[in-house]
Amino acid sequence: MRDQLLHIISMKLLEGKTAIITGASRGIGKGIATVFSEHGANVAFTYSASVEAAKALEAELQVHGTIVKGYQSNAANFDDSQKLAEDVLADFGSIDILVNNAGITKDNLLMRMGEADFDKVIEVNLKSVFNMTKAVQRTMLKQRKGSIINMSSVVGLKGNAGQTNYAASKAGIIGFSKSVALELGSRNIRSNVIAPGFIETEMTAKLDEATVDGWRAGIPLKRGGSPEDIANACVFLASDLSGYITGQTINVDGGMLT
């Protein structure tokens, strides 16, 4: 039994698989790319403007012996998404995993929120999921396998004052993912959702410490999550360990919604 456990611990759960991760030059996306590479996945990741950060991530992850390549691409643009999928397929030979992680916030109370800020958040957070899923669908259908992981938020489940646009986009991702699971399940293509809670990244490090401590105190586990916490859940959904799981939303929130 001990030998079996050691074997499981040492396994690279994504060995030989190719993953596309959008918005991965920093924060949660970077954490996912790192852990995926550690588990043997070849990683194609997108970035918008952070060329230096993307190059640094490519170099950093080469130590794991996997292929890692960044693509400057806008997932909110339909044509960019189609070209990205074509380029990744040409460069890597397959697309086994898609992680739709790209997202933005433009927070404000509804009474002060402009139409442009609502539209932009929907475009980047929700339409990008449509664009990228459409882009990889044909390849996954031909392969008769694939795992699509979409990044929502606890805000998409419970709402949040000052984030009507963000909450709408993240709730929409859940409905979209469930529908994709129903459409593509017969071809062994799975579609699931991760709903992060309060995750501590470079962005939250800029916040007032007292505010952050207040958020931590309200979480049953009494801490914020890390990008690695999200990445580990993604590894599970991307791997064969979750082969009979589709159409589900996993909250990675330290018990925030309990």
Image: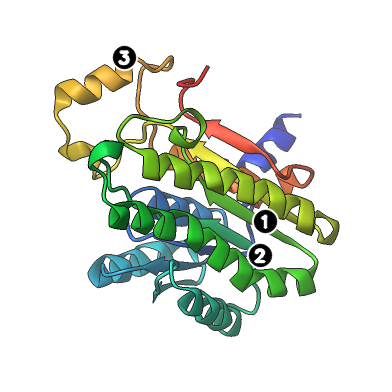
Q: Give the side of residue 212 with respect to residue 69, left or right.
A: left
Where 115 falls versus 248 (above or below)? below
Q: What residue type is disc 2 on?
A: Asp
Residue 189 in the image: state x and y as whole percent: 75, 58
Gap in angstroms between the C-alphas marked 1 and 3 = 35 Å
| Label at residue 217 | 3
**Is residue 37 at all visible to an observer of this figure?**
no
Residue 214 in the image: state x and y as whole percent: 25, 17
Taking depth in this image into account, of 248 and 201 the one nearest to the observer is: 248
Callout 3 crowding tier (Cα within 10 Å): few <14, some 14–19, many ≥20:
few
Question: What residue is shown at x 31% (from left), y 14% (from top)?
Answer: 217
**Is residue 34 at all visible to an observer of this figure?**
yes
Gap in angstroms between the C-alphas marked 2 and 3 = 39 Å
Q: In terms of secondary structure, where does tag 1 sit?
A: strand
Check if mark 2's residue and mark 1's residue have beta carbons within 8 Å.
yes
From the image, state whether disc 2 or disc 3 is nearer to you. Answer: 3
Which numbered disc flags the more N-terminal residue, 2 or 3?
2
Question: What residue is shown at x 50% (from left), y 74% (from top)?
Answer: 78
Callout 1 crowding tier (Cα within 10 Å): few <14, some 14–19, many ≥20:
many
Which numbered disc flags the more N-terminal residue, 2 or 1?
2
Which residue is label 2 attached to? Answer: 96
Q: What residue type is disc 1 on?
A: Ser
Gap in angstroms between the C-alphas marked 2 and 1 = 6 Å
Which residue is label 1 attached to? Answer: 147
